[in-house]
Image (cartoon, grey):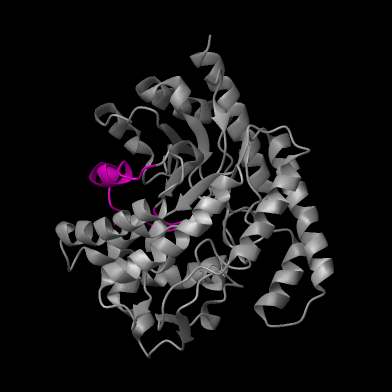
Amino acid sequence: MPDRILTTHTGSLVRPETLLVYLRAIRDGVDVDVDAYQKTLQHHVNDVVLRQAAAGIDIVNDGEYGNTHSWWGYIRERLTGFTERPWPKGVRDEPERRGRDRTEFAAFYEEYNRQAMPEAPVARDGQWVCTGPVEYVGFDALQANIDRLKAATQSADIQGAFMPVVTPGSAVPFRRDEFYATEEDYIFAIADAMNKEYRAIADAGLIVQVDDAFMATMYDSVVPPGTFADYLAWAEVRLEALRRALAGVPPESSRYHLCWGSWNGPHLYDVELKDIVGLLLQVPVGGYAIEQANPRHEHEWRVWEDTKLPDGKVLIPGVISHATNVVEHPQLVRERIVRLARLVGRERVIAGVDCGFAQHPFIRRTHPLVMWAKLRSLAEGARLASQDLWP
């Protein structure tokens, strides 16, 4: 049992410029010196692990540096069965993609996207269409990520290491199926493929973090015109697929990250935690990482006054936000940790971050100097909370 509040985060960290030079070339189809790229990548993974440990983070990762695409788009390089096509005219603006938040605040998002995502490869991304059987073929890329992270952790004083992966539902949120007979067949085929990735990570002694932003954010696109029952039906299929994908992964070697999207926007139409906490707790993992620090969802810590955290599970609340450059005071972090620990138990809280600091190699949410200051504040707040909780 821990004798203090441990700390972690949710995965994606801002990439250093010397690594981005290679990632831009890869993105643009330019040949790179593979050996030089691999040496640079290992150097930065070593550095980011050591910097996390120095900042006071106990459970670390590789910053997702080894992925050349976004937190979910990386999977396109590891699955067969998909064909990329140009988006049909107008499809990218369909309600199922925009949602009420982006519709009502369209002028804001037009301005925000220009400022916050100047290098986002939106125009380069086509529509993924399933045209054949889905199989997992990403073993070499996955093993390289595992090996780099494990090599980096050997020289760092850490409590553990985790590797973020995408859930079956978030891997294919808008992609069209022209091969499988039913939606369930399609989603479950992806789940069976993803199971190979999840199990390989757990077998390597790392914690599997399954990322599922679309589970919450799809509500804004479905309701209205659909009903909450329609949203639940959509969610249940994807949760069943996730349970299938987690088969053979020990709960203590896994955690589930659910958020309302990493962008710094209004979020006026986010589904409330109280309405989906039952879905959250259906996922058979050892820990639940959720947003609890941003101004739209911080009040929802009170959900745990009436909701019992299942035995043997831990809560990993975000106690600092990725979406603002304001560095949270350690005393505020302390308060956020203590009030939750007194509800669910001090041994069952790990202090975390709402979401990743970089949704994509080329999309960052905070400046890297601010990111590290925030992580240090997280660790200091956890130290202060531990003094309250273990007097």
Q: Position of residue 202 (x, y in %)?
A: 54, 46
Above or below 325: residue 31 = below
Above or below 189: residue 215 = above
Q: Position of residue 355 (x, y in %)?
A: 50, 49
- Residue shown at the point (70%, 52%) measured from the top left: 147
Q: Position of residue 181 (x, y in %)?
A: 26, 78
- Residue shown at the point (70%, 36%) measured from the top left: 53
Q: Quadrant of residue 280?
A: top left
Nearer to me, 102 or 14: 14
Above or below 63: residue 136 = below
Q: Position of residue 274 (x, y in %)?
A: 25, 41
Which residues fall within the magenta stretch?
260-284
Nearer to me, 8 or 121: 8
Determine the residue located farthest toward the top in the rendered image.
Answer: 391
Q: Is residue 103 visible?
A: no
Q: Quadrant of residue 226?
A: bottom left
Q: Is residue 248 visible?
A: yes
Nearer to me, 39 or 215: 39
Nearer to me, 124 or 292: 124
Q: Dominant secondary structure of the magenta stretch?
A: loop
33 lies left or right of 303: right
